[in-house]
Image: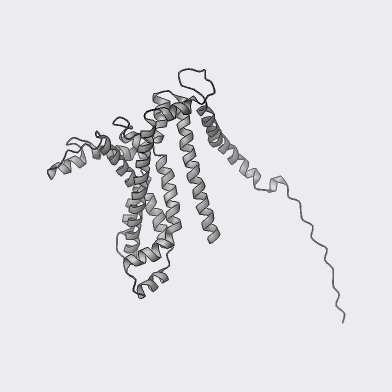
């Protein structure tokens, strides 16, 4: 019997119209981003090259705002304050978040009751707005007998401590409040990272005689290192942009001892009415955010390539 082979004609690709693509659905979002995100960024950069203020409507394009910014006597101390605030906030947020996440995971492995309550209570700090956190810590730090911390310190014969009136103590107090605030978010990422650690590898390390510290150093930390790095970048960006909590707690005082870069922008524009210097400071903060975001995207892309 002869078999007949039918020659199939090649399938012609059908032409897709523009309406059948995802682009029409992206147009409204693109316009929204252009209106509320890209256009304000362009305006801030443009205004940073002017001598604009909120009193006079006339302005000229100049580099005077950047010259004044870098020559202001309070600019470099403000950067130092911001660096101290960001560095210690990020370090202790990472550390405290990791410790809390490690304890929660350990409690779940031991089937202890209350781990969900502990995890939920830690998340409350992440849900509370920064202004509310500033007010809460202002009540804690009040330097009279009405202050909660000074009240308990007086019961043991200590205090009162000048939490908010001494420049050094004020900066430490604001940093401590921000550590408490940011530990919750850090714990979320650390907890998610610890869930990815292979239990088989941990059991094998235990059988081989590795102690708790050796398992932590040689198994757990290398396994969650990418998540730790991503966590580091995200909380660094968030801490650089902290404004609401500091504004509610100290308003940048006493003096300028707790004036971080985001609060300095507010002070320049709305108190000194110097729109050009405020915009120039905003550009510096924008550059820091863009740099941190590029590092984040690089780390995220590298992690996907390795996966």
Which residue is located at x 39 percent, y 39 percent? 242
In the rendered view, does 241 fall on the left or right side of 139? right
Which residue is located at x 53 percent, y 20 percent? 60
Q: Residue furthest bottom?
A: 1
Q: Which of the 4 image quadrants contains residue 227?
A: bottom left
Front residue (pair 49, 96): 49
Relative to 96, is 175 above or below?
above
Q: Is residue 133 visible?
A: yes
Percent x, y for residue 176? 30, 44
Percent x, y for residue 269? 43, 26
Percent x, y for residue 182? 36, 47
Q: Quadrant of the N terminus?
A: bottom right
Count how many numbered circles sit on residues in the image. 0
Front residue (pair 225, 121): 225
Q: Is residue 110 visible?
A: no
Q: How is the image coloured?
A: one colour
Percent x, y for residue 92? 33, 49
Which residue is located at x 39 percent, y 50 percent? 185
Which residue is located at x 49 percent, y 49 percent? 296
Relative to 223, is 96 above or below?
above
């Amino acid at each position: 019997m002869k078999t007949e082979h039918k020659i199939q004609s090649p399938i012609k690709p059908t032409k897709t119209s523009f309406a059948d693509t995802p682009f029409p659905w992206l147009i409204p979002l693109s316009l929204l981003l252009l209106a509320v995100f890209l256009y304000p960024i362009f305006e801030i950069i443009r205004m940073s090259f002017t001598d604009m203020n909120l009193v006079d409507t006339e302005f000229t394009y100049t580099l005077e705002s950047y010259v004044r910014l870098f020559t202001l006597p309070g600019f470099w101390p403000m950067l130092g304050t911001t660096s101290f605030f960001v560095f210690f906030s990020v370090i202790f947020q990472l550390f405290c978040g990791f410790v809390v996440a490690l304890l929660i995971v350990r409690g779940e492995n031991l089937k202890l009751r209350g781990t969900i309550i502990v995890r939920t209570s830690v998340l409350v700090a992440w849900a509370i707005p920064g202004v509310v956190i500033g007010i809460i810590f202002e009540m804690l730090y009040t330097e009279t007998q009405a202050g909660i911390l000074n009240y308990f310190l007086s019961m043991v014969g200590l205090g009162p401590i000048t939490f908010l009136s001494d420049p050094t103590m004020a900066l430490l107090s604001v940093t401590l409040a921000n550590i408490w605030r940011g530990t919750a978010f850090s714990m979320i990422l650390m907890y998610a990272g610890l869930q990815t650690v292979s239990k088989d590898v941990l059991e094998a390390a235990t059988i081989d005689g590795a102690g708790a510290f050796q398992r932590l150093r040689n198994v757990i930390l290398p396994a969650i290192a990418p998540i730790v790095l991503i966590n580091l970048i995200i909380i660094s960006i968030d801490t650089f942009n902290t404004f609401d909590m500091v504004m509610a707690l100290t308003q940048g005082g006493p003096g300028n001892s707790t004036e971080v870069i985001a609060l300095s922008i507010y002070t320049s524009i709305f108190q000194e009415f110097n729109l050009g210097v405020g915009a120039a400071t905003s550009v510096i903060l924008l550059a820091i955010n863009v740099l941190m975001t590029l590092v984040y995207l690089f780390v995220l892309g590298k992690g996907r390539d390795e996966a």
